[in-house]
Image: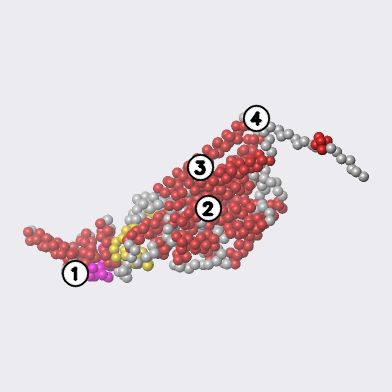
């Protein structure tokens, strides 16, 4: 039986026609092009945020090595015991283990790594804010506020603190990919585990994933998202504890912990530093600032109110506030360690919280009825970008002022980190020039009678021996007792710091330090003691010069210049008989020396003048 068939014309007439597109509707192609345009705009903003981060902190590239850097380089070079283990494996053992053989004592490459990581962190903060449903304005503001903070100088100018930007970059990347499925969960866990081996203080950060986001996910879903990171952090913590990192690296009185009022005082101190927009040297004294609690408490309360108010409309605010607190928790119990660079990771949370505040303001403005709806968002954007730009310019100015501050009457920087690093820089340059490639031991003559005591809080001179005061020799401290100089100048065999004459340094090259921090050569052995005594006498410090020269003459009795300077110093203090005795001895021991001829001429003039009288 044949089936009925219709003619091709009838089939074409009955076939449904596609709906005509309305004018201006370009279909899926337009949507794809729109997605590409949005991605390109996000990429441009990310690049701009990273560029601002690098530009504001460009001065970090000119910094020298700090004391912590020298200690780690000493360990790599075998001048100190090196404890091998998982503790900060990435930021110390791997980074410095690669950098020291590659770059030696050239500080620039060491600083490039944390500097670039800072730019990357600004970009990652923008990406994370966008992932947490923030608009471009809020995400840009969060990234730029973090990028431009002048508080990061304490971190970026010391390569030993590279663990801070390294750990933040890895933790941000881990959080960014934590909401993906499959192998991405493993990648997220691996990234966070690596962050723990850069700086273990990020341990509590996965808890921020329990904060509701813009997707209204249930607590169980958020817990499953956070679980790989929490497990990775727990495994890393167990590994660190089993390696006894706590006892080997974080033990002793310096890392003493307490769980009392110090926790709140530490919190308010950090909160006050975070919003200090006018002090040139916040955190100059690395200790709890008891007077900071009113401002710090206000900041903490404001964050809590913001997180509550923005819980549903702008969840980024609560996420950022949780990040701020989770990053600070590990360092709050420390009694003696309240350091500005501990703020690097928490400031990412504070910046995200402020981005959440901007997102909340935008949502209120767009939801409010009334005239001028189209002008509200551009006006908010103009205000926010103006404030962010003002903050960046203020940070840049304050960073420049910080470099210009010096202890009164000296060329020594007032900032404690810069003080040590610049002393190390001047010393390495002076010693390298003085040795001119020759291998030798180095001794610094720094008479205790001429030492000055400066306040670490104000930089002003103080009377020595004040109650409850602790002092240390700045040059010796900046060079880690001399070992730091040995890694900076390869041809230095050993280093000594002499408060005056001491026996046994006849083969050492002698150096001293001027008030501006410059280190200059004095000469070798006896000649160096003679130069030091002459310099002290010329500056009016005759009594310590006499003591130094007397001891040196006893060790080197046949050095004509040393005895001549000793005689000169005795004459200045009024001991003419002693001065003549030393000059007579000089003639006896060194009759052919050029100084002997000068002494004879002086004696002849003196006798002639006496005869004429």
Q: Residue 471 location in percent, x, y?
A: 41, 59
- Mark 4 touches mark 2? (CB < 8 Å): no
- Residue at 73% from the left image edge and 34% from the top image edge: 20
Quadrant in the picture for residue 599: bottom left
Q: Which one is nearer the viewer's eye here, 451 or 374? A: 374
Q: Looking at the image, tell me whether mark 4 or mark 3 is earlier in sequence order.
A: 4
- Circle 2 packing at 10 Å, graded few (<14), some (14-19), many (20+), is many
- Circle 1 packing at 10 Å, graded few (<14), some (14-19), many (20+), is some
Instruction: Determine whether 582 is above or below 166 in the image.
Output: below
- Residue at 32% from the left image edge and 65% from the top image edge: 509
Judge whether residue 533 is colored magenta. no
Which structural element holds mark 3? helix
Q: Looking at the image, tell me whether mark 1 or mark 2 is earlier in sequence order.
A: 2
Mark 1 = which residue?
A: 590
Residue 434 appears anywhere in the view: yes
Q: Residue 504 location in percent, x, y?
A: 32, 70
Q: Give the range drawn in magenta.
A: 545-559
Mark 4 to mark 3: distance in Å?
A: 32 Å
Residue 391 is labelled as 3
Furthest toward the right, the residue is 1
Q: Looking at the image, tell me whether mark 4 or mark 2 is earlier in sequence order.
A: 2
From the image, which quarter does the C terminus lie in?
bottom left
Q: Looking at the image, tell me whether mark 1 or mark 3 is earlier in sequence order.
A: 3
């Amino acid at each position: 039986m044949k089936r009925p068939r219709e003619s091709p014309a009838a089939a074409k007439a009955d076939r449904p026609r596609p709906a005509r597109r309305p004018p201006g509707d370009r279909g899926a192609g337009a949507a794809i092009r729109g997605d590409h345009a949005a991605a390109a705009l996000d990429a441009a903003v990310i690049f701009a945020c990273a560029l601002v981060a690098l530009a504001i902190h460009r001065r970090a590239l000119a910094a020298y090595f700090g004391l912590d850097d020298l200690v780690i380089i000493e360990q790599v070079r075998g001048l100190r015991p090196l404890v091998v283990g998982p503790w900060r494996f990435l930021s110390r053992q791997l980074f410095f283990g690669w950098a020291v053989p590659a770059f030696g004592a050239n500080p620039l490459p060491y600083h490039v790594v944390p500097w670039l990581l800072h730019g990357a962190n600004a970009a990652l903060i923008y990406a994370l804010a966008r992932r947490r449903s923030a608009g471009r304005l809020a995400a840009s503001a969060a990234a730029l506020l973090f990028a431009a903070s002048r508080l990061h100088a304490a971190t970026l100018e010391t390569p030993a603190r590279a663990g801070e930007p390294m750990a933040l970059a890895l933790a941000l990347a881990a959080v960014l990919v934590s909401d993906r499925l499959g192998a991405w969960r493993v990648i997220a866990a691996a990234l966070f585990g690596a962050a723990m081996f850069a700086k273990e203080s990020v341990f509590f950060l996965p808890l921020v994933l329990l904060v509701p986001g813009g997707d209204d996910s249930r607590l169980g879903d958020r817990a499953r998202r956070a679980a790989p990171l929490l497990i990775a952090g727990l495994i890393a913590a167990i590994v660190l504890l089993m390696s006894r990192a706590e006892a080997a690296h974080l033990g002793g009185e310096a890392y003493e912990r307490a769980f009392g009022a110090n926790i709140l005082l530490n919190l308010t101190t950090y909160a006050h530093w975070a919003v200090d927009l006018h002090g040139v040297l916040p955190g100059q004294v690395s200790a709890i600032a008891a007077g900071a609690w009113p401002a710090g408490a206000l900041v903490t309360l404001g964050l809590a109110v913001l997180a509550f108010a923005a819980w549903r409309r702008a969840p980024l605010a609560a996420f950022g506030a949780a990040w701020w607190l989770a990053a600070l928790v590990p360092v709050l119990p420390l009694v003696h360690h309240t350091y500005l660079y501990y703020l690097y990771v928490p400031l990412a949370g504070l910046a995200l919280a402020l981005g959440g505040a901007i997102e909340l303001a935008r949502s209120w403005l767009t939801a409010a009825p009334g005239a001028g709806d189209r002008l509200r968002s551009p006006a908010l954007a103009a205000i926010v970008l103006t404030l962010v730009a003002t903050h960046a310019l203020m940070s840049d100015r304050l960073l420049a002022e910080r470099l210009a501050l010096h202890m009164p009457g000296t060329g020594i920087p007032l900032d404690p980190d810069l003080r040590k690093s610049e002393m190390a820089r001047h010393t390495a340059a002076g010693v390298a020039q003085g040795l001119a490639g020759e291998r030798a031991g180095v001794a610094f003559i720094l008479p205790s009678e001429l030492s000055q005591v400066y306040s670490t809080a104000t930089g002003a001179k103080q009377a020595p021996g004040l109650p409850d005061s602790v002092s240390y020799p700045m040059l010796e401290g900046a060079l880690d007792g001399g070992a730091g100089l040995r890694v900076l100048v390869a041809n230095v065999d050993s280093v000594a710091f002499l408060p005056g004459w001491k026996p046994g340094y006849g083969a050492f090259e002698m150096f001293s330090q001027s008030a501006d921090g410059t280190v200059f050569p004095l000469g070798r052995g006896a000649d160096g003691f003679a130069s030091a005594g002459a310099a002290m006498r010329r500056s009016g410090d005759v009594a310590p010069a006499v003591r130094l020269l007397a001891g040196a003459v006893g060790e080197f009795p046949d050095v004509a210049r040393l005895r001549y300077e000793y005689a000169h110093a005795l004459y200045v203090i009024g001991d003419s008989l002693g001065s003549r005795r030393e000059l007579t001895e000089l003639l006896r021991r060194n009759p052919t020396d050029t100084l002997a001829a000068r002494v004879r001429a002086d004696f002849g003039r003196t006798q002639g003048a006496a005869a004429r009288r």
